[in-house]
C-alpha cells in the first residue's frame, strides 16, 4: 500500500513538473528570450522536509497568506526562505512563473531578495530564496508587531534609499522596462546587516520594447498604494511605481499604514489628508521617538513623497531622478565641508533652481571644487550656464533651444569672462579695465608691460603704448 502511494505521488509530481516546466519556459522565452541567471531545481521531497510538510510553525510571516505563504526551512544544512503560492486562480498561477523569471534576472542586485531556485513538482510553483536572517517590514514600515516602536530615522532613510535604487534598476537596467506594480512596506525585507531587499515580482509587468506604457485588463496592486491613474485607465507606466513609492515613503515617515479598513476610499483619504495639511502649512505628525526627530530632513522627505504622489502623471518625477546626496564624513572633509550623515532624495532641477533663487548656487559649486574667492564675473558666468541648462530642460518642446544655438552659448560665456576679468599674481581677481587704468594712474603700467614687449624700445614708444592702452580701456568702458 505504501509503495503504491509513493508511486502515485511521484506520478503526480512528474505531471506537475511537466506542466509547470512548460509554462515556465514559455514565460522565460517571452520575457527575456530564454536568457536568465541559472537557478537550481529543488525536489518536492526537499521542500516538504524543509517546511515539515508546510507546517504553520515554519511561517516567516503569518499575515501574508493571501496569494502565497512564506516559510523558513533548511535544505542540506543551509537556511532558505520558501514561498508557496496557494490561490488556485489562473491569474495567480501565472504570477508564480512571473516571480521566478523576473527574480532570476535581478537576483545579482544587492537590493533584491536573491533567488536560489524553485520547485515545479507541486500544482503551483514553489520559489526558494536565500535566507540571511530576514525580517519583514510590517504595515507601519517597522519590524515585529504593529504596536512595536518604529525603526530609527536613519534606518528608515536607508531603507527608502535602497528601495529607490531597486526600483530604478527595474526601470532602467534592461532593454524593456520592468514595472513592479506592488511597491509596499510588506514587500521589503531587511537582512541581518539592515540592508533592504525588495521582493515579490509576481505582479510585475515588462513593457513592450520602445513603449512607455501598456494596457492591462486586470488592475493589480494593493489598496492604499495603488496609482489612481492606473486604476482608472488601466495603463501601466513607470509612474505607477513612483506613486506607490511615494506612499511607501509616507508610511516610513509617519509610521502608519495607508489604509485601516481595507477600502480603496481609505487610501485616498490618507494621501488627501497629508497633502491638505501640507498645503495649509499645518504640521504633519512624523512617527518615531521624540529624541530621534530630524525636522529638516523629514520635511524634505515629505516634500518629495508628495511630489511622487501627484495626481497628474506628468507632475511626478522619474525614479532615476530620485537619488541621494549622501557624502561620507571623509568626502565632506576633503571638500572643506562639515560632516553630515543624512541621506537626501532630490529632483536635481528643483534643487539647483532653489539654490539659485536663494543666491547660494555659485557658492555651493565653488565650495565643492575648493574655490574660496569668487569674483562677480565668475558668478555671472555660472549663472548664465545654469540659465542655459534650464532652457534646455523646459517642459514644452517648443521652448527649448536648438542644439546649434546651445553649442554657441558656452563659447560666448567663456569669452565674457576672458574679456572682463583678469587675475594678477597674488590671487586677487579684479576687473581688467580697473586694473589697467590703476596701473597707468600710478605710473606702474610699464612694469607690467615690459615683460610682454621688447625692452629696448624708446621712452617715446613706451609712452605711446601706454596712451594707446589707456585709450582702449576708455573705449571699452564706453561700450559697457
Image: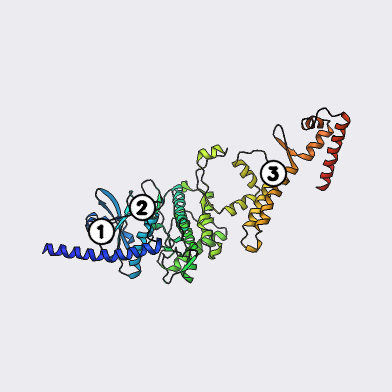
At 32% across and 62% down in the image, what residue appears?
Answer: 68
Structural crowding at the residue carrying mark 2, measured as other residues with C-alpha within 10 Å and reported as few (<14), some (14–19) or many (≥20) = many
Frontmost of labels 1 and 2 is 2
Question: Quarter-wise, where is residue 406 in the image?
Answer: bottom right
Mark 2 = which residue?
Answer: 114
Q: Which residue is mark 1?
A: 56
Where is mark 3, residue-wise?
A: 378
Please tell me whether residue 289 is drawn above or below residue 268 in the rendered image: above
Residue 281 position within the rendered picture, expressed as x and y whole percent measured from the top left: 57, 58
Disc nearer the start of the sequence (2/3): 2
Is residue 138 visible in this depiction of the protein?
A: no
Distance from disc 2 to disc 3, alpha carbons, whole Å, reads: 51 Å
Report whether 429 appears left or right of 118: right
Name the residue located 86 percent from the left edge and 36 percent from the top edge. Answer: 467
Earlier in the chain: of badge 3 and badge 1, it is 1
Q: Secondary structure at mark 3?
A: helix
The x, y position of residue 232, in whole percent, is: 48, 71
Q: Is residue 451 left or right of residue 93?
A: right
Q: Name the quadrant containing residue 93.
A: bottom left
Q: In the rendered view, would you say 451 is above or below 135?
A: above
Q: Are marks 1 and 2 in contact (CB under 8 Å)?
A: no
Q: Position of residue 332 (x, y in %)?
A: 54, 40
Instruction: Pick whichever, 159 or 50, lies toward us.
Output: 50
Residue at left 48%, top 71%? 233
Q: For mark 1, give the secondary structure.
A: helix
Quarter of the N terminus within the rendering:
bottom left
Q: Residues within 10 Å of mark 1 (few under 14, many from 20)?
A: some
**Residue closest to the far top:** 456
Let me know if residue 43 appears in the view: yes
Amino acid at each position: 500500500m505504501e509503495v503504491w502511494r509513493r508511486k502515485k505521488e511521484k506520478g503526480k509530481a512528474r505531471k506537475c513538473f511537466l506542466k509547470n516546466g512548460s509554462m515556465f519556459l514559455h514565460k522565460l522565452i517571452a520575457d527575456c528570450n530564454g536568457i536568465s541567471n541559472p537557478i537550481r531545481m529543488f525536489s518536492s521531497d526537499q521542500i516538504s522536509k524543509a517546511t515539515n510538510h508546510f507546517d504553520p510553525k515554519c511561517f516567516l510571516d503569518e499575515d501574508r497568506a493571501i496569494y502565497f505563504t512564506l516559510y523558513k526551512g533548511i535544505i542540506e544544512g543551509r537556511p532558505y526562505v520558501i514561498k508557496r503560492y496557494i490561490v488556485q486562480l489562473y491569474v495567480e498561477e501565472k504570477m508564480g512563473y512571473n516571480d521566478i523569471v523576473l527574480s532570476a534576472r535581478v537576483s545579482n542586485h544587492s537590493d533584491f531578495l536573491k533567488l536560489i531556485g524553485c520547485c515545479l513538482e507541486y500544482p503551483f510553483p514553489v520559489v526558494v530564496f536565500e535566507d540571511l536572517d530576514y525580517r519583514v517590514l510590517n504595515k507601519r514600515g517597522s519590524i515585529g508587531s504593529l504596536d512595536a516602536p518604529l525603526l530609527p530615522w536613519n534606518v528608515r532613510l536607508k531603507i527608502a534609499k535602497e528601495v529607490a535604487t531597486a526600483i530604478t534598476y527595474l526601470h532602467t537596467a534592461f532593454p524593456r522596462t520592468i514595472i513592479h506594480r506592488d511597491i509596499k512596506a510588506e514587500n521589503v525585507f531587511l537582512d541581518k546587516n539592515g540592508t533592504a531587499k525588495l521582493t515579490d515580482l509576481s505582479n510585475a509587468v515588462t513593457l513592450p520594447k520602445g513603449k512607455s506604457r501598456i494596457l492591462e485588463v486586470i488592475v493589480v496592486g494593493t489598496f492604499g498604494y495603488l496609482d489612481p491613474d492606473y486604476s482608472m485607465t488601466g495603463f501601466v507606466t513607470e509612474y505607477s511605481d513612483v506613486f506607490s513609492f511615494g506612499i511607501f515613503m509616507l508610511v516610513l515617515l509617519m509610521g502608519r499604514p495607508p489604509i485601516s479598513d481595507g477600502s480603496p476610499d481609505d487610501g485616498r483619504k490618507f494621501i488627501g489628508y497629508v497633502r491638505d495639511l501640507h498645503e495649509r502649512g499645518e504640521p504633519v505628525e512624523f512617527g518615531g521617538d521624540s529624541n530621534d526627530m530630524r525636522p529638516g530632513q523629514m520635511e524634505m522627505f515629505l516634500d518629495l513623497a508628495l511630489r511622487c504622489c501627484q495626481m497628474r502623471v506628468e507632475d511626478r518625477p522619474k525614479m532615476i531622478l530620485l537619488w541621494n546626496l549622501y557624502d561620507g564624513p571623509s568626502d565632506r572633509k576633503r571638500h572643506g565641508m562639515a560632516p553630515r550623515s543624512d541621506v537626501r532624495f532630490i529632483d536635481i532641477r528643483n534643487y539647483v533652481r532653489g539654490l539659485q533663487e536663494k543666491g547660494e548656487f555659485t557658492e555651493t559649486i565653488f565650495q565643492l571644487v575648493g574655490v574660496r574667492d569668487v569674483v562677480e564675473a565668475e558668478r555671472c558666468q555660472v549663472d548664465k550656464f545654469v540659465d542655459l541648462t534650464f532652457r534646455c530642460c523646459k517642459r514644452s518642446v517648443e521652448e527649448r533651444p536648438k542644439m546649434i544655438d546651445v553649442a554657441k552659448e558656452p563659447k560666448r560665456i567663456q569669452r565674457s569672462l576672458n574679456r572682463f576679468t583678469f587675475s594678477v599674481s597674488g590671487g586677487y581677481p579684479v576687473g581688467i579695465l580697473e586694473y589697467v587704468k590703476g596701473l597707468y594712474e600710478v605710473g606702474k603700467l610699464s612694469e607690467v608691460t615690459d615683460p610682454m614687449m621688447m625692452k629696448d624700445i624708446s621712452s617715446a614708444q613706451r609712452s605711446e603704448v601706454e596712451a594707446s592702452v589707456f585709450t582702449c580701456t576708455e573705449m571699452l568702458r564706453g561700450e559697457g
